Amino acid sequence: MARVRYGARTEREIAATRTASARLPGIWSTGVVAVWETDPDAVAAVLPPPLKPTGGPLVRVNISEVALPGQPLGAGSVAVAAAHGTVQGWYPLVMPMTHERALTGGREVFGEPKKLGEVTVERDGPGVRAALARHGVTFVEVRGAVSGELPVPGPSRKTDFYFKFLPAVDGSGFDTDPVLVHCVRHETVRRLERVAGEVVLRESAYDPVADLPVLRLREITVGEKTSDQSGRVVERVDAQALLPYVHQRYDDPLQILDAPPEGSA
């Protein structure tokens, strides 16, 4: 009988897959990062317990094109500064991806809030434009012009916080207790430039990042970097406390009934 590819893999095949994954070469990305100060009450409102706000109400958008072999990956993230105990990091609210493989792997393994979307990174001379779009709405756009080189920073360690859970089969609560994941990235940068520009947030019923307005732009940079990541479960969390935030992860049709923020165009 010919091999049935949906059949069980042998232990040798499974081990070979793990070995190959561990030996992937460094993959570089070109990305635009913008950081701004926003309404501290808005940051506090989006953080599920046990996460808490930090000393500064910061939002960070990262929009990158990753040089994966065969087909580049568009990857984005909109996150707010957060703390878990003494650990400072970022809590991503939405992470648009252009490939399903990146989406499913991140959500199922780490609990990342990834969704299929459109990711744009463009460079024309000094001109830079990066954008995230879903459901026909470009809900984040960063645009400007390179204004100079920046010193290349040394290797850094960054932490993102994720909640990993499975919604219950009967539609009420969770099937198992949700857990909080610390995802640690070791990042190496080989080029970094300063960008003079602006961040534009547009109203979206499904990705309402416009609720985190740009009150003071801290910085915009464009650079080339590579990183690895590893995650660990640090604690089980209160299911009832997390339940009111589950809509962050999904395109909830009821979000269409939410009113846009006052003064939005």
Image (cartoon, rainbow, N blue to C red):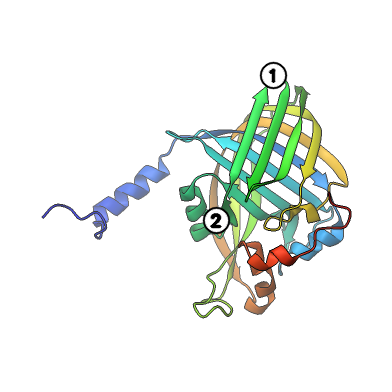
Secondary structure under tag 1 reads loop
Residue 86 appears in view: no
- Measure the alpha-carbon separation of dots 1 and 2: 38 Å
Relative to 227, does residue 253 appear above or below in the rendering? Answer: below
Tag 2 secondary structure: strand
User: What residue sits right under mark 2 in the picture?
Assistant: 231
- Mark 1 = which residue? 125
User: Does residue 147 sit above or below 6 in this rendering?
Assistant: above
Q: Residue at the location (70% across, 52% down)?
A: 79
Which percent across, then down, holds residue 21? 40, 45
> What amino acid is at disc 1?
Gly
User: Which quadrant of the figure contains the N terminus?
Assistant: bottom left
Looking at numbered disc 2 in the image, what kind of residue is underneath it?
Gly
**Tag of residue 2:** none
Give x and y (percent) for residue 48. 71, 67
Q: Are marks 1 and 2 in contact (CB under 8 Å)?
A: no
Which sits in the foreground, 47 or 205?
205
In the figure, is residue 115 to the left or right of 125?
A: left
Which quadrant would residue 119 be assigned to in this image?
Answer: top right
Q: Position of residue 166 (x, y in %)?
A: 52, 70
Q: Between disc 1 and disc 2, whose residue precedes?
A: 1
* Residue 209 to residue 72: above or below: below
Q: Nearer the viewer, mark 1 or mark 2?
A: 1
The crowding category of the residue bearing disc 1, from other C-alpha atoms within 10 Å (few below 14, some 14 to 19, many at least 20), is few
Q: Along the line of sight, which residue is nearer the eye, 29 or 144? A: 144
Determine whether, in the image, residue 231 is placed left or right of residue 124: left
Q: Residue at x 65, y 45 (%)?
A: 133
Q: Give the residue displayed 55% in from the left and 56% down from the top.
A: 231
Question: Is residue 20 left or right of 170 when viewed as pictured?
Answer: left
Q: Position of residue 197 (x, y in %)?
A: 81, 32
